Amino acid sequence: MTPSTGSSSTRSSAPGSPVPPEPARESFLDELYRGRLRWDLMSDFPAQDPADAKAGDGELSEFTAFLRAHVDPTRVDLERRLPDRVLSELRERGYLRLMIDPELGGRGLSAANAFRLVQAAASWSSAVAFTMGIGNGFGSGAYLPLLGEGPLRELIREQVAAGTVSAGADAEPAGTANSLRRTTATLSEDGESYLLNGEKVFIGNGAIAGLMDVTATVEVDGAPQTQAFFVDTATPGFEAYARHDFMGLGGAPNAALRLTDVRVPRSHAFAGSNTELRRSRELAEIGFLARTLVIGAPALAIARLCLHWSREFVNRRTVDGRPLGSYQEVQRLVGSSLADVYAIESVTRWTLLGARQSDTLFEHAALKNIASLTCWRVIDRTMGLLGGEGFETAVSKARRGAEPLPVERFFRDARGLRVAGGVDFLLDKFAAQGRLTSCYYAGAGVPAGPVPVPAQPAGLSTRNREHARFATAQAAEFGAVCRELAQRHADPADLFVQEHLLITLGRIANELLSVAAVLARSAAGAADDGETDGEADAALLADLHCTGARHRLAALWSQLDRRTAEPDWAAACAGWLDGGRWGPLLDGVITTAPDAGPYLTVSGAPAQGLDGEAPTAR
């Protein structure tokens, strides 16, 4: 259903799973669904360890020089292909093994520094960032901490040490929202191997991976289950038969796969024979961190670039001799983007570094939509601010002598972030379903009523103290709604079929999480991270963000207002889908898809299969 970044439902504990892994400690998000903002959990707002940050500075400097010297992002986007030499350099320099132990050829970085490097890549070339994000987040090396001694661990260690590019293959033509995969794994007659058959689509790094964990449906004790199988892509019957070209993310080595009787040793199955891999929480941690690298880092990078482009544009433009920045609406546009970047930063920092104070596992899940949707607001706003200059391609600007800002390219890339890793509205649904399950159905019982709320953070400005009071009240109302829904629907299945309700709850929770992170960071002061000039700057950005969030929350709450009866959406949908109603709405348009066949080679992908020779990074 959705383009995948290479995630595996087994690895990420299936976002729609009815019983998500339990938090190891108190969870800010779970507390929010119960009706209170746990300000005490965020009271010591985290910052990166200075020594780790310094180490990351050196890595970032080296990597930035590499990008400038070896990657031509405009050419990559136009040709829709990362050159083999770039892939080889990424592999050999360890940039696809950022968090892997140096003894296996990795760079041994923390998750925070890995995020910084992927963000830098995304600010230059989204194709490089996606290749790195998938290789580091969803690569086979991520499994090593979970594996006991045995053939599978030995296989992965050997492949990681050799620098083999790896990825995960989960998404299928039928869509990843299905609970089972149509790709099948059948035990061979001798019981020593599985035979895999099926197709995968939208597989990140699928065109270059030499080792891939492939999800498939297998019979276990007579019942179908989804498991992952580690496959050497040189195995007979494995075929990466076509590259995907997306609207954005041009050049990312994303491919469609076909498996025909691909033989995988039984010992290379991720579950089943490997009983030590029963820890769903650890798998969820790997999957959610991977999505933070693949989606969160590029989203923050693009939003930051928009701030730069907006400043450059506004400072050089006048209207009838009046500076563009003196107009109220322009000031509002620029201020909104500043606040949005600050919000993405704040939630990211809390998610990556706040684990010592709280269980931030599900903040990783929320961060995907918070980052990608906020980034989309920023770049859409920037496109409007720049007008024709934003819509124009960088090559066209260069042709007429203008500065070739790649706003148009990143606009396309940003839209892809809302789709990759799970389309946004489905993730909101799954997130709300998971938290409601954890807080109200999975043996937790329904709380009898509101519980005491910790005092709001000290050190807030006058306006931000009012925002904190507002957010606390909103959380209490949110918890009351969740509690009432659980009481009214003893069977969670009755509640979970109300999809738009769940989506709206998920979006309200994301807004409140963002407000809390922004206010907590502001209260702690921002002078320690060098990103602002001090507490006054942090207070202003928090005020700007909270003001915008309050408008968005008002719109979301209106969708839960039961005083207004819902129209008959089902009747409208059925009437259109069966072709019996509203046919004239298509009058005057040509609905036949134009023939794209003659142009299969235009983007560099031949009509039959992939390139003749496999990339050296494979």
Image (cartoon, rainbow, N blue to C red):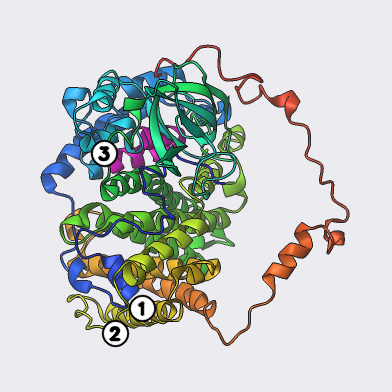
> Does 220 appear above or below 589?
above
For the record, the magenta segment spans 114-135
What numbered label is drawn on residue 275?
3
Which is nearer the N-term, disc 2 or disc 3? Answer: 3
Q: Nearer the viewer, residue 474 or 433?
A: 433
What amino acid does circle 1 point to? Gly
> Does 459 appear above or below 294?
below
Element carrying mark 1: helix
Tag 2 residue: 450
Q: Nearer the viewer, mark 3 or mark 1?
A: 3
x 21%, y 70%: residue: 523
Q: Nearer the viewer, residue 9 or 249?
A: 9
Decide: few, some or many residues near mark 2? Use Cα within 10 Å; few <14, some 14-19, many ≥20. Answer: some
Decide if residue 314 is in sight here. Answer: no
Q: Are marks 2 and 1 in contact (CB under 8 Å)?
A: yes
In the picture, measured across the screen, residue 304 lies left or right of residue 503, that is left
Decide: few, some or many residues near mark 3? Use Cα within 10 Å; few <14, some 14-19, many ≥20. Answer: few
In the picture, measured across the screen, residue 423 lies left or right of residue 515, that is right
| Quarter location, residue 160 | top left
Tag 1 residue: 479
